[in-house]
Amino acid sequence: MIQLKKINVKFNTGTALEKWALRNLSLDIFEGEFVTVIGGNGAGKSTLLATLCGDVTPLSGKVMIDNVDVTTRSSWERAKWVARVFQDPMAGTCAQLSIEENLALAGKRVSGRGFSAAILKQDRERFREALSKLGLNLDKRLKDPMGALSGGQRQAVSLIMSTLQPMKILALDEHTAALDPKTAHYVMDLTRQIVEDNNLTALMVTHSMQQALSYGTRTVMLNDGRIAYDVSGQQRDKLTTQDLVDLFHSQQFSGDDFLLT
Amino acid sequence: MNTIQFFGAFELGLIYGLVALGVYLSFRVLDFPDLTVDGSFPLGAAISGILIVSGYPPLIATLAAVVGGLMAGVITGWLTLRWKILNLLASILTMTALYSVNLRIMGRPNLSLLGEKTLFSFVPDLCSSLDISPTFIMPAIICLIALALWFILFWFLKTSFGLAIRATGANPRMSMAQGVCTKTTTYAGIAVSNGLVALGGSLFAQSQGFADVTVGAGTIIIGLASVIIGEALFHTRSILIALASCLVGSIIFRLIVALALNASGIGLQASDLNLVTSLLVAVAMIVPEVRKKLSVHRAKK
Ligand SMILES: Nc1ncnc2c1ncn2[C@@H]1O[C@H](COP(=O)(O)OP(=O)(O)O)[C@@H](O)[C@H]1O
Ligand SMILES: [Mg+2]
């Protein structure tokens, strides 16, 4: 189980730009849950993920993964438990390295690295098999540089990379936001398939209400650093995007805008 | 240029090829502009020089030089990683300090190793028994050493840890997300880089027969020039070839320098080396920029 306990995050302390990004936020994510997170611009969605992943250390509060307190562990240490896919396809992969080298790097996320060859024959077999699931013919392009792939292809490979080693949670921060609608749809379906096939626990930030409801098992709405709404199960099944929009207005959400898609 | 000059340039090119490998590792692989090398090259020369003069076995003296280089790299890494000093500035601090350290190590500005037992003391005997001129033997031996290091470095970068070093330079954020402790990889990369450079300094002192605190000046530019020449010759994504191109680039650099200095009529002196080198590096960095401008210009038309 992933637990965020009374997390407070403040940026630019003591300046005019001082900003509470998360306010006393608590969230328990149970094993096998696929939580989608929505909220207006600046609501704190990315900060929530960054706190889980270790990019941001909270002012107060605790981050627990399976009862291990990881609050002060750095992001590379938490990679043992947390797999990530970034919003920017460039950010999550190494353009200069080949596809197989990217996979090999991710293939040691948990196990750590030594001085044996980074890529062995059996690794290649494994990579080929994993990539062939994508149906993008990438299994024949193991030696091509990652930079030669399109944004959508890179996000797809990022998802494959995350599954090469065990994890406690998969963290996705608007990982389809940089893609065209058709590719975004493909990557979203792939995400769902990967989460289901591997029985993953996932936390996915999205800017689209429609995505937030049609994917996952639970939806959390953030507003001004707090959880404004948390829905799952049958209640969530009945929910429409219009309900979410109404909720958004009724709560007088702050934030610059809210994509009503 | 006569044969002796040619082979002399070849030999020097291979020795500085180790510097080029080190510079490639820091500048290109790790994306860490490390100027420590201007201090770690003479550090290698100083450590092995003083140990050899004091009667230590040359192999020990050479290994000690490598360890000294590793440590110099670690200090630069520490200033940057622990104290968040800008990497370029951190390396300048180490380099500057090393100038004094090197003087302390040697106890005087220069040491002569003529007549001392060095790694290459067996060469004259070998030459007389084989009846070949040392002109050819020395470059051949240095060539073997350089090839060995070329391969070791290749192997290193192809290991899981080496891949993590390469990823750290290319995308540190992604590397951390994949569980790479980028501090460790940066320390290791900068240390190995300076270890290689110090080994170059040690071999330089032993093959040339002297150690001098001033031999370090311009090492970084020479190394960069070699890397850039190599890159211009081989556009490659293969690490094996990229590393080889550092060695080839260094040899070509020495040949160009030897040609320039020997060409009567231009009137260049040995002391013009740094000027010529800097011009070479500057031109090599300006050309791609101009090309880009030109192609943008053309695209607009
Ligand atoms: N590194 C940072 N430095 C300063 N302010 C930040 C930083 N990251 C986020 N913020 C601020 O914290 C708030 C929440 O940001 P974020 O979590 O990125 O929102 P979201 O992802 O929901 O759009 C915003 O007001 C943002 O400006
Ligand atoms: Mg965001």
Image: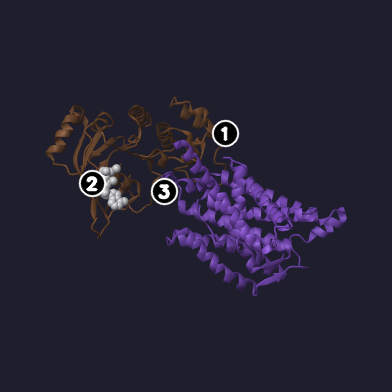
The colour assigned to chain B within the rendered structure: purple
Labels 3, 1: one chain: yes
Q: How far across and how far down the image is residue B174, in percent?
A: 42, 44
Numbered badge on residue A76? 3
Mark 1 or mark 2: whose residue is earlier in sequence: 2
Q: Is mark 2 within 8 Å of ligand 1?
A: no
Q: Quadrant of ligand 2?
A: top left
Foreground residue among B93 and A84 = B93
- Secondary structure under the numbered disc 2 in the rendered image: strand
Query: In this rendering, does residue A114 appear at all?
Result: no
Marks 2 and 3 in Cβ contact (< 8 Å)? no
B124 with respect to A63 (left or right) = right
B4 with respect to A151 (left or right) = right
B21 with respect to A109 (left or right) = right
- Secondary structure under the numbered disc 1 in the rendered image: helix
Q: Marks 3 and 1, Cα distance to the nearest angstrom?
A: 27 Å
Q: Give the label, 2 or 3, closer to the camera.
A: 3
Look at label 3 and name its amino acid.
Answer: Trp
Q: Tell me: residue B250, above or below residue A34.
A: below
- Secondary structure under the numbered disc 3 in the rendered image: helix
Q: Quadrant of the N terminus of chain B?
A: bottom right
Look at label 1 and name its amino acid.
Answer: Lys
Foreground residue among B280 and A210 = B280
Labels 2, 3: one chain: yes
Report in which chain the residue with disc 1 lies: A
What residue did someone put label 1 on?
Answer: A121
What residue did someone put label 2 on?
Answer: A26
Mark 2 neighbour density, 10 Å: few (under 14) some (14–19) many (20 or more):
some
Look at label 2 and name its amino acid.
Answer: Ser
